[in-house]
Amino acid sequence: MTQEQTGTRERPDGAGGSEWLDTPDRGDGRVYVMAPELDFAVRVALATGRPLLLRGRPGSGKSSLAPFIARELGWRYYEHVVTYRTQPRELLWSFDSVRRLGDAQVAAHRDETPDDAAYVQPGVLWWALAPESARRRGRSDDAEITDPCPDPFDKVNSDRSPDHAVVLIDEIDKADPDVPNSLLVPLGSHRFQVAEIGREIETERPVLPSAAQVPARARHLVVLTTNEERELPQALLRRCVVHVLPEHDQAMLVRIAKEHMAEGPGEVTDTDVELAEAVAEKLMEVRDHAGKQDVRRPSTAEYLDALRACRSLGIRPGDEEWRLLTRNVLIKPQQMTGDPA
């Protein structure tokens, strides 16, 4: 891993090339320009087995790091975007009690009892730590499985290591404090109890001999992101390696742009690079103006959007259309006074 943010995400099936404009938020980790400080934080997280908590402005690349690491290392990848409705154990498992109750009423007429495991849905952390157990829905190794649970990221993970995984828990700050608090034991000990079936889930033994021969590096990496909407519990912070993604300067913006353009259709020309530099320079001016007006400064992701629009529509900074683009993409409805363009 030697690279940092793109602010973008790609289709989970890995489609790229000529389809890059169809998927502006890329999520397969094809492009990420990583600063040395971030690379070090990742290595510390892997060395300690601790989760990596990423802080930074929206659009700075927090959510793009995890799929990049998974792709670079050839590890399985899972993600869960937290919302205000996320339940405390949802990242571990869920249980369909309504369906179970309905089936139990039918089974009672036949003097039967439903299999509780059939109503268990493994969450992303379960899949990361114990994929075979997740496939069996927590049943014992010798149980007959008639309803195996499919890997929710099967297309991505089909050719990746069965012994390693990267998990993205995105926007953990949106959740009620009960959610991060419920993860303290699973993240620290890599085990948890599934109450409905009375089984403890823990990290499975390596399938491949090579996975057991790297004791200095964890087999799993959990990446948490926060937009600072809600203060995180101190107990969670204590268990994390924390890194703040800085606002990218002009040189880094251009470097990121080059990596992105190289993934698109056609070759990157000198004209493309000059355009990336010009848009980056104008973006810095807009940021300064936004700072003076005390409104949100445009992010790296918005810089890439502006650059794509300029390349596709033939817009150049200083054109009348650039002024419109600034308001459509960079400033948006923030009603900033004066002319940032």
Image (spheres, rainbow, N blue to C red):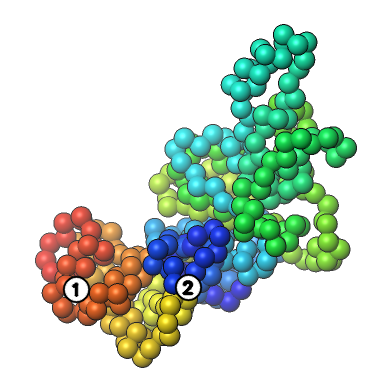
Q: Is residue 123 above or below residue 59?
A: above
Q: Is residue 329 above or below residue 152?
A: below
Lateral position of residue 73 relative to residue 250, left or right: right
Quarter of the image where one finds residue 208: bottom right
Looking at the image, do the residues carrying marks 1 and 2 touch, with CB atoms under 8 Å apart?
no
Image quadrant in which the C terminus is located: bottom left
Q: Which mark is residue 225?
A: none
- Choose between 296 and 124: the one closer to the eye: 124
The residue where tag 2 is placed is 17
Looking at the image, which residue is at 51% across and 72% down? 31
Estimate the x, y position of residue 77 in percent, counting from the top left: 62, 57
Quarter of the image where one finds residue 221: bottom right
Q: Nearer the viewer, mark 1 or mark 2?
A: 2
Looking at the image, which residue is at 73% across and 30% down? 117
Q: Is residue 40 above or below residue 178?
A: below
The residue type indicated by label 2 comes to: Gly
Q: Is residue 218 at least partly visible in the picture?
A: no
The residue where tag 1 is placed is 322
At label 1, counting other C-alpha atoms closer than 10 Å, the crowd grade (few under 14, some 14-19, many 20 or more) is some
The residue type indicated by label 1 comes to: Trp
